[in-house]
Image: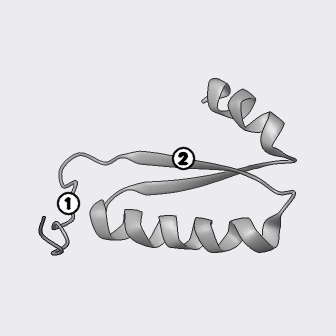
Amino acid sequence: MTQALQPRPRLVGQKQTIVIVVGSYNTKFVQGMVNHAAREIEVLAPSAVIVLRQVPGAFEIPLAVKEI
């Protein structure tokens, strides 16, 4: 098995909107993941619009996604 990393695919073309839904309960842990995800999206889909949707906790995440 190779140890080389696979190249990241780039999503180029029509404008996309990507929504990140996070719970705000554990902000100090979640914020780092949100920052990293946003940076990766910017690399993979430079023309994408990133929307951050915060909800109070994990229970509300599926409800927020259902509204999207």
- Residue 7 x/y as whole percent: 16, 67
Residue at horizontal 21 percent and vertical 64 percent from the top: 8
Give how far across and how far down residue 59 sits, in percent: 82, 35
Q: Position of residue 26 (x, y in %)?
A: 83, 63
- To which residue does mark 2 refer? 19
- At x 13%, y 64%, the residue is 1
Q: Indicate how the structure is coloured in the image.
A: one colour
Q: Which residue is mark 1?
A: 10
Left-right relation of 68 to 6: right
Front residue of 33 and 38:
33
Amino acid type, callout 1 = Arg
Query: Mark 2 Cα within 10 Å, few/some/many (few <14, many 20+)?
Result: some
Q: Secondary structure at mark 1?
A: loop
The residue lying at 31 percent from left, 60 percent from top is 47
In the displayed orientation, state which residue is furthest to the left.
2
Q: In the figure, residue 66 lies in which quadrant?
A: top right
Q: CA distance from mark 1 to mark 2?
A: 18 Å
State the residue at coordinates (80%, 67%).
Answer: 27
Quarter the C terminus occupies: top right
Amino acid carrying label 2: it is Val
